[in-house]
Amino acid sequence: MVSLLGGCAGAEGLSGELVISVIPSWIDETSAEGPAFLAAIERYEELNPGVTITAQSASQQDIKEAFQTAALAGGGPDVVTMDNCGHAIDLAAMGLLLPLNNFISDEELEATYQPGPLKSGRFEGAYYSLPWFMNCCGLYVNTDHLAACGLEIPETWEDLENCLKVLKENGYGGIITYKSAYAFYSFFYQNGCPVIDATGEIPVVVVDNEAGTEAWNYICKLILEYDGLVESFKEATSWDKVHESFANEEATFLMGGDWCKTGINNLNTGVNYAITDMVSGKQQATILGGWTWNINANTKNPELAYDFCRYMCSPDTYDVLKPGGRQSARIDWDTTAAFTESDMDLKVLADQFPYTMPRPGVINEKTIDEIITNAILTVVYNQVTPEQALADLAQELRDNIESNYGDI
């Protein structure tokens, strides 16, 4: 029985009660994914007759904080799903998650899951998150605007720069994206700069090295010379605002993930567009999104908790992902078979998965995002020169790392 407050199964000897925390739509029988998710839990219980799963929910905005508060007090759900935007690293740093090497080798994890989402849960040499589903940033293109200007869909930095130049000359707007560092990480990654190198014991800020400076100057050139970011970027504090800007044809390009297609189409403006991968620089790269499964360090039944997480990430539960159009983070996920004819245009985004990279693996990534976003805004508002903005950005990032890791 599934009790609501909100595996590959059949592992021998598993028993007990497990409490899991997910966002509300997963246990809402009226949502797209709810029925399939609840059915998967029931299948797991049937395959493990001694197990009872209790599902509780918290909003996407609150799930990490709610778990953290409960776990710090010695309680909390046995398992929690979270965005792969650095939440697991914060919780691992506080000792609130179990490392996966208690259950599985790093080699097996790396042979099973895409590298980007796996790295999103790596802290101090250990993996803490099982990747569930993933997405990444691509480019939505207003094809009418390009056709009117005699332009092709851009594939490289140079192509995008030329497009923005010609679009501006013809009175068309440039790029819209969410007002955060999210999409801009891609440009640094495409130029071989990780922004913050987290491979050592203490992260090192490299945003202002040669590769980082080149990427920053490119971003600033798009903004300052070609009005590359449309006016509504300044107020784009939700994806709904991003979708509106593109659907209303203010912007020619939208940098975002697979969820943007539904958001654009729901506005029913009739905009004609194509979806393609992010432009490439010195290498192909784009920024990661998606969700993971994580095990509470306070759980009384760690083996059961891990087995359930493994089950939810296994091919046995692919049917849970399909109603919402989500893509598994497993390497063996068949992206061709995953898409129906109606959403085959999204396959180009899934084809980017092998070179999709997570945000820097550092404590308090949320603040890192805010620092980078504010630096971009100082350029947008012409408050300082690009050179000064980069110098200030690098220093603020170093100050943040020092406050979280000690002297550097």
Image: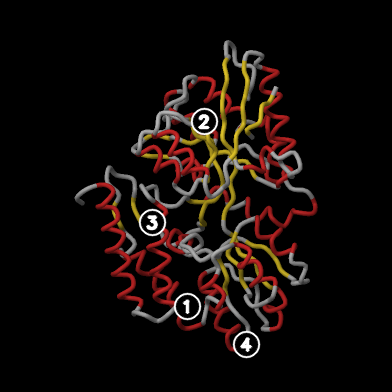
Amino acid tagged 2: Pro
> Residue at (48%, 38%) from the top-left corner?
67
Q: Classify residue 142 as left or right of residue 21.
A: right
Give whichever of discs 2 and 3 has the lower sequence position: 2
Return the residue at label 4: 171
- The residue carrying pointer 3 sits among few (fewer than 14), some (14 to 19) or many (20 or more) residues within 10 Å by Cα, namely few
Give whichever of discs 1 and 2 has the lower sequence position: 2
Q: In the picture, residue 164 is in which quadrant?
A: bottom right
Give whichever of discs 2 and 4 has the lower sequence position: 2
Return the residue at label 2: 77
Label 4 close to label 3 by CB (< 8 Å): no
Give coordinates of residue 336: x percent, y percent: 71, 46
Pick the residue in front: 99 or 295: 295
Return the residue at label 3: 367
Give whichever of discs 4 and 3 has the lower sequence position: 4
- The residue carrying pointer 2 sits among few (fewer than 14), some (14 to 19) or many (20 or more) residues within 10 Å by Cα, namely many
Give coordinates of residue 248: x percent, y percent: 69, 75
- The residue carrying pointer 4 sits among few (fewer than 14), some (14 to 19) or many (20 or more) residues within 10 Å by Cα, namely few
Q: In the picture, residue 144 is in which quadrant?
A: bottom right
Give whichever of discs 3 and 1 has the lower sequence position: 1
Which label sits in the foreground, 2 or 3? 2
Please determine whether, in this image, residue 402 is positioned above or below residue 323: below
Q: Secondary structure at mark 3?
A: helix
How far apart marks 2 and 4 lie (CA) works out to 54 Å
Q: Secondary structure at mark 2?
A: loop
Which label sits in the foreground, 4 or 3? 3
Amino acid tagged 4: Gly
Pick the residue in front: 210 or 237: 237
Please determine whether, in this image, residue 251 is positioned above or below residue 62: below
